[in-house]
Amino acid sequence: MEYPHLYLRDWPFWIVPDKSFYSLMADRTQLRSDVKTLLRNLSRRSASSIHLMWAWFGAGKTHTLHHIEYLCKNEFKNLIPIYIEFPKSVKNFLDLYKAFISKVNMDIVDDVFSKIYGDEVQKELYFDSPDLSSAFTLHIGGTDEQQDVVIRWLRAECRELRTLRTASISKPIQTAEDCIKVISWIIRLISLNNPNTQIRTIWMIDEFQRIEKCRVPAREEISSSLHSIFNRCPASLSIIISFSGFPEEKKLPSWLSPEIKDRIGIEKPLLLPPLSIEESYKFVQDVLTYFRNPETISPNPLFPFNEESVRNVINLIEEKAKKSKRKDQPKPRTIMQFFNKVLEEADPKIETGELKIIDTRFVSEVLKNVMLPTEEFE
């Protein structure tokens, strides 16, 4: 939906952005540069790696991961992104496996497997996991019923032995070791997709801080499984572990296992702190520019706001943060929420001509009783 009276092609202040928003990285100049540098380096080498993304709550972590996904698909096409969110309720590594397998592009796996069938890699796969070799074979050339069994088996949804045997599969996927083998082989097959180019899987795990609430056995199994996958894939894999919290200088979270910390090494995490006042201003300007209708010329770059009203909103966020003794403001999510509130009130008035532009008086009236949002994890 377009908003011609606002000179906008769509609503600009999304609390939960959709895919059309992922090409934009508003402000965050240093982060944008760091992300591009990381992806460029990963696209030019083969060794596997683990990276951290550490953000304040609401600082744009998930959006940044989806921006990475966008860049992989449009600029760094030899990087295959797989984004998952750490499940809110996790019993063991199988839950992470289910999230991973649901995002795998099986067309790529099928294409590679059909090319290697009968060669040394396929023989190695059969020796390591006859069930997985049979599953890949029948997913390409089996009957519709067999292909359905294979998909449900890969998703760890089919456990009936009689049904599995119709697809030459001997047992269901249910242990961490089963999951490790499937993920490792899928990553290896994806890496063989183009013999002339090094193909790397970028596995992004969002909200990883939730592991802290897992039972100790589950936490240990998840960490050791990720470590095992990394060891089984010395090339063509990068894992981005993304989490929210309040970063401490030179100190990683205690729930990161020693093995994972060791694999990260000396690499600096990608950090997403709150924005400064000027960064917040630039953030709003970038968002409005992104959604500006290119076929029209707006009265000013910030329309339907002006510079004074934009700064007024940001200053009010900072004032409310100081009163509540919060040091995590302003940040993208809060900025979006406050500007969304103001624009919602102004939109119909501007459309009817009752309001010409959003000024500081209007901002103060709309936001006078608005409180800062309470974060989910605080």
Image (tube, helix red, strand yellow):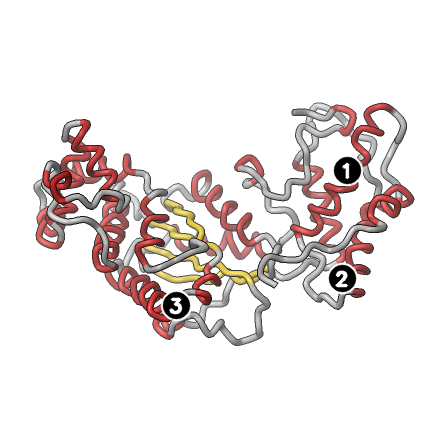
Front residue of 344 and 288: 344
In contact (CB < 8 Å): disc 3 and disc 1: no
Say which residue appears at 30% left-offset and 44% top-offset.
197
Q: x, y (%) of residue 194?
A: 27, 41
Q: Is mark 2 on a helix, strand or loop?
A: helix
Say which residue appears at 72% left-offset and 66% top-offset.
326
Relative to residue 41, is residue 130 drawn left or right?
left
In contact (CB < 8 Å): disc 3 and disc 2: no
| Cα distance between the residues tagged 3 and 2 | 35 Å
Say which residue appears at 28% left-offset and 50% top-offset.
187
Query: How packed is label 2: few (under 14 Cα within 10 Å), some, or many (20 or more)?
Result: some
Dot 3 or dot 1, earlier in sequence? 3
Q: Is mark 1 on a helix, strand or loop?
A: helix
Q: Which numbered mark, 3 or 2, is in the foreground of this view?
A: 3
| Residue identified by numbered label 1 | 343
Q: What residue type is labelled 3?
A: Arg
Q: Quadrant location of the N terminus?
A: top right
Dot 2 or dot 1, earlier in sequence? 2
| Residue identified by numbered label 2 | 321
| Residue identified by numbered label 3 | 215
Q: x, y (%) of residue 138?
A: 15, 35
Say which residue appears at 16% left-offset and 37% top-offset.
115
Q: Which amino acid does label 1 sit on?
A: Leu
Q: Is mark 3 on a helix, strand or loop?
A: loop
Query: How packed is label 3: few (under 14 Cα within 10 Å), some, or many (20 or more)?
Result: few
Q: On the image, which quarter does residue 119 sit in?
A: top left
Q: x, y (%) of residue 5?
A: 78, 25
